Image (cartoon, rainbow, N blue to C red):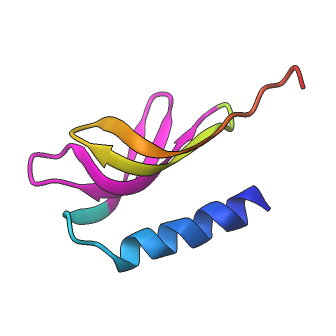
Amino acid sequence: MKKIILSFLFILFISTNIFGEVKKETYTNGYYIGEFNSSGSKHGYGIYYWNGGSTFAGKWAYNDRVYGKNIFKNKNY
């Protein structure tokens, strides 16, 4: 259910693409799908998926999270 909600949010974010290019970038601790500015920074709306299963969906500015929704996944729960 959470993936469906995140996918829906992502479609909304893409439809309002006013900041830059939308693409997928892979990192050692996960991957990001969303907008990047002309200098290659995460900037605009996007979703970061960590390898452990946690996600952040929201707005980014110059590689920093500005606001959005964190969904944490902890193996102890």
Left or right side of 6 for 10: left
| Residue at x 21% of width, y 39% of height | 62
Which image quadrant for residue 64? top left
Which image quadrant for residue 63? top left
| Residue at x 30% of width, y 65% of height | 22
Left or right side of 65 for 31: right
Residue located farthest toward the front when viewing the structure as drawn: 67
The segment highlighted magenta reads: 23-51
Q: Quadrant of the N terminus?
A: bottom right
User: x and y percent of residue 45 in the render?
Assistant: 36, 58
Residue located farthest toward the top when viewing the structure as drawn: 76
Q: Would residue 44 be counted in the magenta stretch?
A: yes
Left or right side of 70 for 23: left
| Residue at x 41% of width, y 55% of height | 46
| Residue at x 74% of width, y 33% of height | 73
User: x and y percent of residue 72 in the render?
Assistant: 69, 34
Which residue is nearer to you in this view: 30 or 74?
Answer: 74
Q: Main secondary structure of the magenta part?
A: strand
Which residue is nearer to you in this view: 64 or 53?
Answer: 64
Q: Quadrant of the C terminus?
A: top right
Query: Considering only vertical position in the picture, is 76 above or below 25?
Result: above
